[in-house]
Image (cartoon, rainbow, N blue to C red):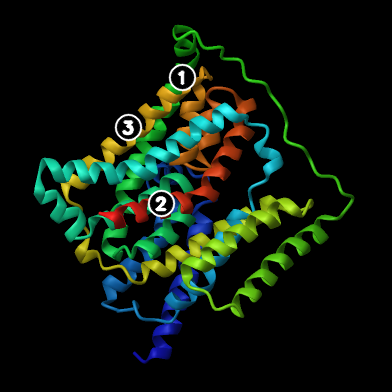
Amino acid sequence: MSDQQLLITSTALVLVTVGFVLWIGKVRSGWIKVLLDWFPAILFAYVIPAAFTHTLGLDLSGVVLHDWSKKWIVPFTVLTVMSALSFKQLKIVGLKPILVFASGSFVIATLPVALVVLFGRLDPQNNVIFLEQGYWKGLAPIVGSWIGGSTSQLVLKELAKTPEALFLSILVLDNILVNIWTILMFQFIKWSDQINRAWGIDGAIPMVEPPEINAGIGLFRINLLTVGCILATMMLTYFLPMSFLMSIVVLSIVGMLLGNVISVWNHKLVLRLAGFSIVLIMAILGLKLDFANLSLPLNLVVLVLIWLIFHFGFMLLVARLLKTNIAWVAIGSMANVGGISTAPAVTSAFRKELMPHAIVLAILSMVTGTSWGMLTIYLFGLL
């Protein structure tokens, strides 16, 4: 095929994939719901293009869509996600739960580096696996996935230069662990009141509703202002010579300012825009995947399991020291590891009134994930 034919083919494949993922994510059929509980719709966005190219023997790894994604779509996604955080809503959570949540994020970002060092001391062959063969590059996207979600995961994949085959293997492992962890947190949060009583912790949680904006402006104008600011910001970045990393940092800061300085900013709209662009990015990434190289060393799987367990244990310790409701451990862990969909779901098993709190923590996770992941990459660089 000519370059033009490859571009047309890849564009059509990406669009069909995105349409399928958006459709199946809304289907409420029983067996599809069970399937999506273990194989989320967004993973289809990555696998379908890969399966297509593998079956037909096409090489779409060099099409210009990849350049467009890195230059425009990923920065756009970062901008929209960062603008979704409202500092006004953050006040409803309280300091202690945020500290519990942040302690979980800290362990996620720093422990993999310590574990790689420890594994290397126990067996020098582990240094070959993680450092010389570069399997540490698969740990950075996990940090992004657990703290920041798909947006941070994709950004950190680029920053760490994670190979495509390793990235898919990590996606599969991450998906399995998150589903198991969600089930465990559903059970744990039901026992939080008993743990609170055993440890002498006051389990009372004040309920404060987030402030609602009523500026007398129609929804159309609010949406127009929100989208207009995002597009104007993206156009300005076109004229500023910045590296990929610098553009991510700048757009993160600008996004936070937009979401909090503009009083009528539509936070729900920017989250929907981010969700769509994440699916688009995943579908484009799937064009590069080669199934032939799909594998993970057992030591990496063991390391990730230890990593996840210590994350939970440290949050539990911090919650006890702060004498805050142990339910925040499950909520904070799911806000980190699960994200904006699973965190409120787990919370509803405890108290439905806390679901807005869980969503705020999940959004906080989304907007801090890239920063934590950059710390992880920096620490690995020191090795």
Query: In the figure, is residue 69 to the left or right of 236?
Result: left
Q: Earlier in the sequence, mark 2 or mark 3?
A: 3
**Residue 6: in sight, yes or no?**
yes
* Three-letter code, disc 2: Leu
Image mark count: 3
Q: Nearer the viewer, residue 290 or 319?
A: 319
**Pointer 3 residue:** 310
Circle 3 sits in a helix, a strand or a loop, which is it?
Answer: helix
Asked if marks 2 and 3 touch (Cβ < 8 Å), the reply is: no
Residues at marks 1 and 2, CA–CA distance in whole angstroms: 26 Å
Q: Nearer the viewer, residue 235 or 102?
A: 102
Circle 2 sits in a helix, a strand or a loop, which is it?
Answer: helix
Q: Is residue 335 above or below residue 244?
A: above
Asked if marks 1 and 2 touch (Cβ < 8 Å), the reply is: no
Give the crowd class for mark 2: few <14, some 14-19, many >=20 residues within 10 Å.
Answer: some
Q: Most extreme residue toward the bottom, as rendered?
A: 2
- Numbered circle sitting on residue 375: 2
**Residue 295: in sight, yes or no?**
no
For the residues carrying marks 2 and 3, which lies nearer the camera in this image?
A: 2
Residue 333: horizontal and vertical position, in percent? 45, 34
Residue 209: horizontal and vertical position, in percent? 73, 31
Give the crowd class for mark 1: few <14, some 14-19, many >=20 residues within 10 Å.
Answer: few
* Three-letter code, disc 1: Leu
**Pointer 1 residue:** 321
What residue do we see at 42% from left, 81% from top? 9
What residue do we see at 55% from left, 33% from top? 98
